[in-house]
Image (cartoon, rainbow, N blue to C red):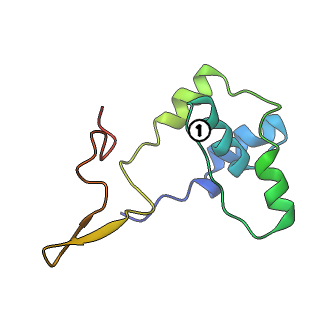
Amino acid sequence: ESDPSLLQDPRIVEIGQKYGKSAAQVLIRFQLQRGVIVIPKSVNPERIQQNFDTTDFNLTVEEIEFLESFNRNWRACVPTKEVDGETVPRDGEHLYYPFHA
């Protein structure tokens, strides 16, 4: 199974069109409404501004539930560390790793 490509997903693009936003803005807003701190990355000045322009709309309960359905237990970056010569997840011993409460 390939890595998720949510920025090109037509269903997320459609939600963005409803609000006049990009798919990236929809996904940033989704996380903000969930109380998750978002640290987007871009070197493009226009996209940097777009990343900030995510507070003038709210996703509906139905849209949030829809976006939550994309959960694939996938992580873009898993920080690692060396322990006794073995590479292990850096945060593997954390109470909420890998995101189980």
Residue depicted at x 66% and y 62%: 41
Residue depicted at x 61% and y 52%: 9
Disc 1 marks a residue whose amino acid type is: Gln
Q: Nearer the viewer, residue 33 or 60?
A: 33
Q: Position of residue 67 (x, y in %)?
A: 54, 36
| Above or below: residue 41 compared with residue 51 | below
The single residue placed furthest to the bottom in the displayed view is 85
Judge from the rendering whether residue 7 lies leftward or rightward of residue 98; answer left or right. Answer: right
Location of residue 62 by image quarter: top right
Residue depicted at x 76% and y 51%: 51
User: How many numbered discs?
Assistant: 1
Judge from the rendering whether residue 35 lies leftward or rightward of residue 1; answer left or right. Answer: right
Q: Position of residue 83 (x, y in %)?
A: 18, 70
Q: Secondary structure at mark 1?
A: helix
Q: Position of residue 53 (x, y in %)?
A: 82, 43
Q: Position of residue 18 (x, y in %)?
A: 79, 35
Q: Nearer the viewer, residue 1 or 56?
A: 56
Judge from the rendering whether residue 64 lies leftward or rightward of residue 58; answer left or right. Answer: left
Residue depicted at x 48% and y 35%: 68
Q: Which residue is mark 1?
A: 31
| Above or below: residue 81 compared with residue 14 | below
Image quarter (top left, top right, bottom left or bottom right) of the N terminus: bottom left
Location of residue 55 by image quarter: top right
Q: Residues within 10 Å of mark 1 (few under 14, many from 20)?
A: some
